[in-house]
Structures are given as structure tokens and as C-alpha cells.
């Protein structure tokens, strides 16, 4: 039996929306990667994070099908939940700061490969997109107001693992901010909100986090 919590990361104004994140606080209870991968697949969230050392902020991140060295919304959610000033991921250390009720994390641009940024002419075009076939990780985006730095985006991981569209994707927002070299306010999915931009040689993303429902899943993670 595996106990886990659910957070909603990158909530919209008023705490709406956000991408659900599964958090297994007692990562030590699931030491094997194969077991962690099975749990992430059975839970079915776009990402599940295992906390290996809550004081040091050591975490391990999985989608339903692959282990990730770094991902944005698990890092923001874990930083908010653990209250730490840094995280330790497989990719490296992640800086954390808090401001105006938002939790922000900073990453290195070289961690953000493997995603295709695809620009469209209008927000309406992005909103009308059909989910593309698996095979390519696509971040579809368009300016809402280029002068103001506001963006409409949708994310299609393309892994064929049941996550056809991701509600809010921190790493893709970081990649877009790094590519454009400017601060952005991104509305993604049904109404999630992400703030991203360059910061001191790194790229930062942040947003609101809210608790979902704590759960105990009988049989999840069992052989």
C-alpha cells in the first residue's frame, strides 16, 4: 500500500485549475526504480515525484512511462510542499525562491531539450488544435499580447502513455522563456498560469500551488 498526496501546480487566479502532481513523501519506502515507475504508471498523473530526503530536497521524478532528470511542475510542487530553499534532482541542484505567494524554481537551459516549440499566429489557433499523434513532444504557443509578454499555450507530450495533453508544463515554459529571452505570463491548458523568465544565467518558472487530496492507494506499487 502506497501513501501519496496530490498537489495542483500552476493554479490559475483564485486557485483554479493547475496540473495535478502525485507526491510519495516516503520515497525510501520505494527504493527500486522499477517499482517507482510502476507506481507512477498506476497513479496516472503526468508526473509523480518521490521524496528521497525532505530536508535536503532530494527528489526523483517519473511520468507514467519514463524517469525524468528534471521537470518543472514536480519541482515547483515539491519545493512548495517541503519548504526547502533548493532541490536536488538527477539533473542537478534547483534553486528555489518564494515571492508574493508564488513558488519559483530556476533551472539550467541545457536541461530543457527534447521539446519542440511550435508557434501559431493566434491564441484561437492554439485553442482549436487537435491532439497530434504520438512521437513528438510539442509545445504549441501564440502571443496574446506580445508587448505585455502574455502567451497562450498547450502541451502535447506525445509519449503514448495516456497523457495526451499536459495541463501545465514548467520545463516547456522555461524553454520558451529561454528561447525568447524575456519574462512571460503563460496561460496553459484549461486555465493554468505560469510565470517564466531569465534570471541570472538561469531560467525561472513559478506559480501558485494548492493541495489536492491526500490518498492511500491499496495495491499501488505492490508486486
Image (cartoon, rainbow, N blue to C red):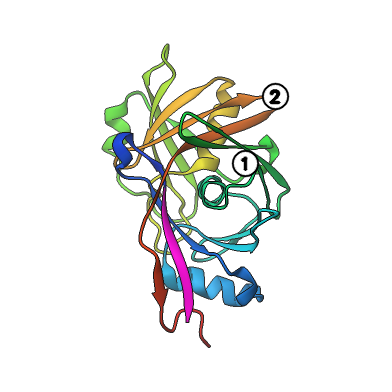
100 to the left or right of 197: left
Q: Residue at x 38, y 50 (%)?
A: 165
Residue 3 magenta-highlighted: yes
Q: Are marks 1 and 2 in contact (CB under 8 Å)?
A: no
Give the secondary structure at mark 2. loop
How far separated are the C-alphas under marks 1 and 2?
17 Å
What main secondary structure does the magenta stretch of the protein show?
A: strand
Is residue 30 at all visible to an observer of this figure?
A: no
Q: Which residues are magenta?
A: 1-8
Q: Which residue corresponds to mark 1? A: 112
Image height check: is 149 above or below 32?
above
Image height check: is 144 above or below 33?
above
Give the secondary structure at mark 1. helix
59 to the left or right of 137: right
Sort mark 2 into few (<14), some (14-19) or many (20+) by Cα contacts within 10 Å. Answer: few
Residue 39 percent across, percent down from the top left: 50, 73
Is residue 78 at all visible to an observer of this figure?
A: yes
Residue 179 percent across, percent down from the top left: 58, 27
Q: Residue at x 37, y 45 (%)?
A: 18
The mark total stands at 2
Residue 210 magenta-highlighted: no
Q: Which residue is nearer to you in this view: 77 or 84? A: 84
Residue 38 percent across, percent down from the top left: 52, 75
Amino acid at each position: 500500500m502506497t501513501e501519496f498526496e496530490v498537489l495542483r501546480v500552476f493554479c490559475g487566479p483564485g486557485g483554479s485549475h493547475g496540473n495535478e502532481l502525485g507526491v510519495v513523501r516516503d520515497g525510501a519506502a520505494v527504493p527500486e526504480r522499477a517499482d517507482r515507475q510502476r507506481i507512477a504508471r498506476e497513479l496516472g498523473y503526468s508526473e509523480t515525484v518521490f521524496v528521497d530526503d525532505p530536508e535536503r530536497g532530494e527528489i526523483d521524478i517519473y511520468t507514467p512511462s519514463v524517469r525524468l532528470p528534471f521537470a518543472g511542475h514536480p519541482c515547483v510542487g515539491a519545493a512548495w510542499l517541503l519548504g526547502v530553499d533548493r532541490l536536488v534532482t538527477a539533473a542537478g541542484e534547483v534553486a528555489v525562491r518564494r515571492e508574493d505567494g508564488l513558488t519559483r524554481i530556476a533551472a539550467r537551459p541545457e536541461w530543457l531539450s527534447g521539446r519542440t516549440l511550435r508557434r501559431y499566429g493566434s491564441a484561437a489557433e492554439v485553442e482549436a488544435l487537435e491532439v497530434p499523434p504520438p512521437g513528438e513532444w510539442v509545445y504549441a504557443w501564440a502571443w496574446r499580447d506580445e508587448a505585455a509578454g502574455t502567451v497562450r499555450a498547450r502541451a502535447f507530450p506525445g509519449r503514448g502513455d495516456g497523457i495526451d495533453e499536459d495541463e501545465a508544463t514548467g520545463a516547456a515554459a522555461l524553454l520558451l522563456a529561454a528561447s525568447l529571452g524575456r519574462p512571460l505570463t503563460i496561460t496553459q491548458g484549461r486555465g493554468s498560469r505560469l510565470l517564466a523568465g531569465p534570471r541570472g544565467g538561469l531560467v525561472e518558472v513559478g506559480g501558485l500551488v494548492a493541495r489536492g487530496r491526500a490518498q492511500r492507494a491499496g495495491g499501488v506499487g505492490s508486486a
